[in-house]
Image: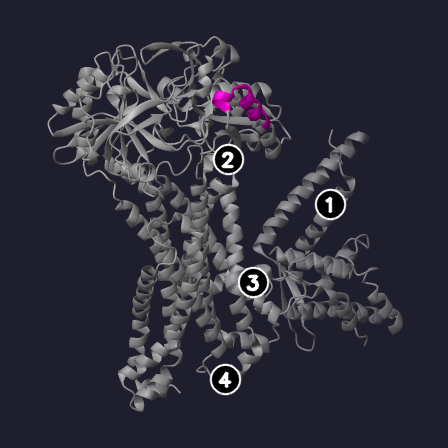
Amino acid sequence: MTDIDTRALDRELKRGSAELLILSLLDARPRHGYELGKLIETRSRGELKFHLDSLYPLLYRLEERKWIKGSWVEKAGERRRRFYKVTPEGRRVLAEQKKTWEKFVEAVRRVTGDDHA
Amino acid sequence: MPEWRTDIRARLAHLDLPPAREAEIIDELAQHLEDHYRELLAGGVDPVEAERLARSDFQAGNVLAKYIAALKLAHPPVAITPGAPSSRPFGGLWQDLRYAARMLRNNAAFTATAVLTLALGIGANAAIFALVDATLLRPLPLPSPDRLVSVYETTAQTQRSYVSGANLNDWNEQLRTFERIAAFAPNVASMVLGSEGGVPETVPRQWVTAGIFDVLGLQPIAGRVFSDEDDRSRASVVVLNERFWRERYNADPGIIDTPIRLDGEMWTVVGVVPETTDVIGRSSIWALRPLLGAPPRVRAVYNLRAIGRLRPGIDLDTARADITRVAATLATEYPETNTGRGAALEPLRDTVIGGDLRQTSILFLSVVAFVLLICCANVANLLLARAAARRREFALRSALGADRRRVIRQLLTESLALSLTGGVLGLGLGAVILQVAPAVIPPGLLPPTLTLSLDLRVVVFCAVTAVFVGLLFGLAPAWQATDFAAARTIASSSRSTTARGSGLRSVLVAGQVATAVALLVGAGLLLRSLVAVENVDRGYRADQVLTMMVDPPGMPSLVQFYDTVEKEVMAVPGVASVGWATTLPLGESYLGSVPFSVVGDPPAAQGREPEADYQIVSASYFRALDLPIVAGRAFDDRDIDGRVPVAIVNEAFVERYLPGRDPIGQRIGIVQYWIEGRPAMMREIVGVARQVKGSVDEREPMLQIYVPLAQEPMGDIFMMVRASAGDAAALTSGVRAAIARVDTAQLVSVRSIMTLDDVLAQGTSRHRFRATLVIAFAALALALAMVGLFGVLAYTVQQRSREFGLRRALGATTRDVLRQVARAALPMIVAGAAAGLALAVVLGQLIASMLVGVQPVDVATYIGVVVLVGLTAAASMASPAWRATRVDPAIALRSE
């Protein structure tokens, strides 16, 4: 029997899901960091909240992996902002992660569902 | 508006991010906080609370820095700022290495020159180190080799007499400090191995006593070794050498306990022993010589070489005291034979390696060390020249804040990179040298068990040498080049000569010249020794003589056999004459020296008789070798068994023991130790033979007694066949066929076929090997020194081209300019040569024992070397001097 390292699993789930969240939000259109944080918080109705000091390092990491790309955009009368968009590589990863996530949710659902059946 | 940036910057401060990236992050995060703050204000929160809430976007502790530190952006590749100070002691070592690699790649010519020079030096050292390792450092390849000693008997004449089997038995019974002593016959002879239906073959065989393998600590590979029971029962048993067993019997274990026919008799193979047994003699078969139960007269037969194994923990002095005590006991017990006989011990390793080989190894090692020094000096010179060219770079670095230590480290990294590359190449070169060495090294120079191999020890030696020389030739240039104060003052003018640099380089060149001169003198002395030994007056006049050892076993009449063979060989076309002798001129004496007394002279004390080399020769010997009889007559048909025993002595014998007397008719008493129990044999001198050399480098003329073969028949004897014309070696097959016609039973073993010129060449091979190698290294040293001289002069001329141009413009002639160049070169050469000659005087004394026919301080050699160095120096000066005279004043001055 293999022991499940529940702490590691937890960490992986969190990190994997955070990446998934960001990639899918950016898939729709380019956004800046504040908007991303805000969207995650509002759409999860306050269940998920990113602190600034974990959100940006995560963005930088995705950028280093070349899944997203940030660029400075200046609009008239505003200070410049850094917008992020998904790269083709990021899109491929997103599709994969979505699939994995759906399978995982489905598996969990089946397990928990059977108990109730 | 709150100030966000200070807070963010503080959180990132210790990460040491690239400034541009840090600014971006601060911008982005500040924007985030600003957005949040504004939103709160817009939502009606008061500014103080809004700021507090916005700042709460940061979690407790510096999480931001922690996360960012894990990202790549926090670890940018370090920009190479050569010479920038580093906080860590070895920080930037990789960077140094990469920079060094780039510098060396960009200066391919310089790098190639330096690396090849070093490879030469290190390669030569690696090969010689392998020799030194084998001869001086490695123990013998036997178990507990430090407990093995050679055991000799001593007499008033010699400290190294062979051992009598009876004494050896008594030693084994009475000694307390030895586990055992065993012995072997000094010479490897041969036996004829019969094969069914096939051609009989001659196989090298050595006699050994029963305990020899136990003493050596060697276990049989198959079967067993000799037992004491074999000894007691005087069994006809042999063991095979592993090499012979594999080659001749395909390692067939079935050979054990099988009888084989040797010299026509049946012997049983009891076992196979490892090749290491070669340490006592390179043989294929070891046959048992029984010692137990031998008749008492054997005590006077001294014909064995003994090796003993000390008990654990016994030192040499204790063992010496023990064996001396036993020898004294034996002297009282057997006064007739043992009075005046003691015993001496020597570590077996010293016996096997031998003083001559050890000296040669040390000589070679010193020579290659000198060559390596010259290589280092050359590379140091190259580095100095380059360092001078790079002064602007160093000055610039210093201005940018590089500290001296850091730049020195950079330069040392470069020189280490050079030396390590040279070391790797040198190791390869050493491997190649060791591959070809066996073909070049004269046979017999190295003991049979000693092999030259490129092992881990040689690799380590190369690595250590490379690092050492890297520091040696790198330190001075690095130190000097980084004298920034000087560098700044000269940076403005590229034309200033760097006085101190050229001074150091001149000293290096002078040192190279000195080393080359010393080596050349050594090479010259060895060359003169070689010439002396090659042109040694052999005494006999015949050239083109073929020799072979003939061993007819169990013949009813040896004399008749030799006569028949002689007649048969004489009939071979091209044969002028045939003779027989137990010793080859300039070869090893087979019977050795015998004690003798001149009848009528007062007798010498027992054990203090004079000794002379004893040689049995046929009547035809003197004619065959064209060895003149200077007084009396040669042997002839009168001198046969049953007639008056006669002898011929040589000139040195007469001078020493019969001065002012007519030697003819004098009688001498000869103790024939090898004929068991026979008392001294009286012989009448019938002739005096011309002096022949005992060995090419003998210090004193050899005393010789010749006796006629017909009166003293002997197996194991050399036949000498003189060719009437042409090459003696061409007679070989005809002579062998003639012997075969006589030896119908195929019992005669014929071996050691060579010409007398071969014997001489073997005798001189050590001298030739030594001289050749030292000459080669000295030539290499000279070439390297001259390259160094050339380099310095070429550089000087380049530096002074403006000066030469000016001189030309002011009317200096070509001769004047040449004089200027010579003036730059001469002090280096003269000082170097003088120092070299002084060094040569010291070195000459160290190699005095290797010199023959030449004194350690030999003026002719000195003059020759000085002339040679002068000529080559002139040659290496030619090109720079020519260039100096070709400086165009207009061009030289224009560039100012």
Q: Which of marks 3 and 2 is nearer the N terminus?
A: 3
Q: Mark 4 points at which residue?
A: B492
Tell me the kind of residue under disc 2.
Arg
Task: Judge whether residue B381 can be spotted in this image.
Answer: yes
Depth check, front residue: B885 or B504: B504
Q: Which residues are the magenta region?
A: B325-338
Q: Which of marks 3 and 4 is nearer the N terminus?
A: 3
Disc 2 to disc 1, C-alpha distance: 74 Å
Residue neighbourhood size for the residue with mark 1, other residues' Cα within 10 Å, grouped as few (<14), some (14–19), many (≥20) = few
Q: Where is residue B310 in the image (x, y as percent from the top left)?
A: 59, 28
Comparing marks 2 and 1, which lies closer to the viewer? Answer: 2
Q: Relative to B345, is B789 on the left or the right?
A: left
Which quarter of the figure has residue A38? bottom right
Tell me, yes or no, whether the highlighted magenta stretch contains residue B327: yes
Q: Relative to B144, is A9 on the left or the right?
A: right
Disc 1 to disc 3, C-alpha distance: 44 Å
Depth check, front residue: B229 or B686: B686
Comparing marks 3 and 2, which lies closer to the viewer? Answer: 2
Tell me the kind of residue under disc 1.
Leu
Q: Looking at the image, do the residues carrying marks 4 and 2 touch, with CB atoms under 8 Å apart?
A: no
